[in-house]
Amino acid sequence: MVVSLSSTGSLLLPLATSNGSSSRSSRFAVSTDKRMNLFYHKPSKEQKKVVCACVAPSRNLGSDELSATKFNDSSKSENLKTLREPDDDRDVLIECRNVYKSFGEKHILRGVSFKIRHGDAVGIIGTSGTGKSTILKIMAGLLALDKGEVYIRGRRRAGLISDEEISGLRIGLVFQSAALFDSLTVRENVGFLLYENSRMPEDQISELVKENLAAVGLKGVEDRLPSELSGGMKKRVALARSIIFDTTKESIEPEVLLYDEPTAGLDPIASTVVEDLIRSVHIKGENALGNPGNIASYVVVTHQHSTIRRAVDRLIFLHEGKIVWQGMTHEFTTSDNPIVQQFAPEEFPDGNVSILSNCAGNFAMPAAFYKIYYQSGSF
Ligand SMILES: Nc1ncnc2c1ncn2[C@@H]1O[C@H](COP(=O)(O)OP(=O)(O)OP(=O)(O)O)[C@@H](O)[C@H]1O
């Protein structure tokens, strides 16, 4: 079967799962070109490495030394309780240090530095073309920087993720478009990396797919094709694909998800569902099954005030390739930085879920109505 990519759905692409060495032979004949487009990978890489674009190798980089990022059920609550002082870097999962990036004559990033800590829910905002998606791709290891450094759990990444130099952290990148394989069912899309890259039996993968779909509020859609789903459902399927992981592994590495405008193209209601799902799959959240999420930290690039308000705790404001402001979301509206003032609303609408708001026009609807829509899984 030849697999083609959907041109419509968003992509939530797990960059890391299980050990590349345990790959089974490929079950899905995805054309190399499509994989290259999907994973931004060099065609010269062998297939295992292409899969590794979304599957960080599981070579252990001494995670025992990094107790703050140990990731199993028992440590989750402990991690939250023992959030460290900002000057303690043991909980830093990704650090960008003085990153520069140009495209030809265009100097896009001009010395960007920030840290993503365990438990973080960060938004990157700023005007169009200021380099938000670029920094996300650099963090994901899909784009090389010109100058500066990226550290993954304290280890400097020498090149791109395809160089297989770094592990100990799973990094997923959620593109705003081009997500699902058109000719694969929802089950095959969600379980893709496990079918391709783990030794899990198919019935176990199938069960896991079902669980992860249920975690994002979708039931009974396993046999559907992407073309049979709404835009919002595709985003949910893509989210399920990004949070699924090989449960048979002895140690599970923490996962950071990088979302690039995850609500782009969605109406206010569907945007709200996605924003709440982003929260729900985080370790501080609770998924649709009532279980804590698995995502250690996430970064969202967005233009939407509703996403800022609902889905992130901390904001990084990029302007002309530099960070001009950082702070907690609630501080955003009170900043006296003139650039920030131009971007920020005078105040965020009430955060109560009974009113859904969106910068596109303060859309509001009653909570009960929202729940019916959400539970029906129709968007
Ligand atoms: N691969 C590339 N080759 C050449 N130019 C690029 C490339 N990728 C990005 N750019 C340019 O770099 C600039 C920053 O792009 P980027 O997508 O990071 O901006 P952004 O802040 O995410 O914008 P938006 O909010 O509009 O999505 C843009 O001018 C874009 O055209």
Image (tube, grey):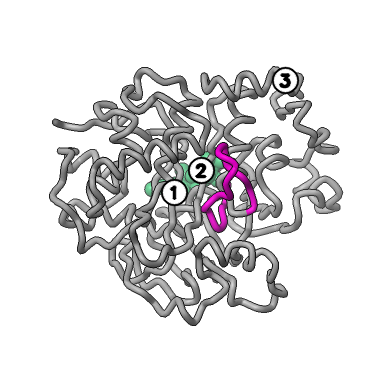
Residue type, mark 1 in image: Leu
Q: Do the residues labelled 1 and 2 touch (CB within 8 Å)?
A: yes
Q: Position of residue 91 (x, y in %)?
A: 59, 71
Mark 1 or 3: in front is 3
Residue at screen point 42% across, 59% down: 170
To which quarter of the image does residue 33 belong?
Answer: top left
Residue at screen point 53% across, 26% down: 265
Q: Are marks 3 and 2 in contact (CB under 8 Å)?
A: no
Q: Does the residue labelled 2 lie within 8 Å of ligand 1?
A: yes
- Judging by the rendered image, the residue that carries numbered circle 1 is 173
To which quarter of the image does residue 277 belong?
Answer: top right
Residue at screen point 39% across, 45% down: 13
- Judging by the rendered image, the residue that carries numbered circle 3 is 368
Nearest to the observer: residue 351 or residue 136? 351
Residue type, mark 3 in image: Ala
Q: Earlier in the sequence, mark 1 or mark 3?
A: 1
Q: What element carries label 2?
A: strand
Q: What element carries label 1?
A: strand
- Judging by the rendered image, the residue that carries numbered circle 2 is 260
The residue stretch that appears in magenta: 284-300
Which mark identifies residue 142? Answer: none
Q: Where is residue 273 in the image (x, y as percent from the top left)?
A: 60, 30
Q: Can residue 192 be seen in this view?
A: yes
Q: How far apart are marks 3 and 2 (CA)?
A: 30 Å
Mark 3 or 2: in front is 3
Q: Position of residue 362 (x, y in %)?
A: 76, 24
Q: Which of marks 3 and 2 is nearer the N terminus?
A: 2
User: Taking 281 as reference, is 81 above or below it?
Assistant: below
Magenta region, main secondary structure: loop
Q: Position of residue 261 (x, y in %)?
A: 54, 39
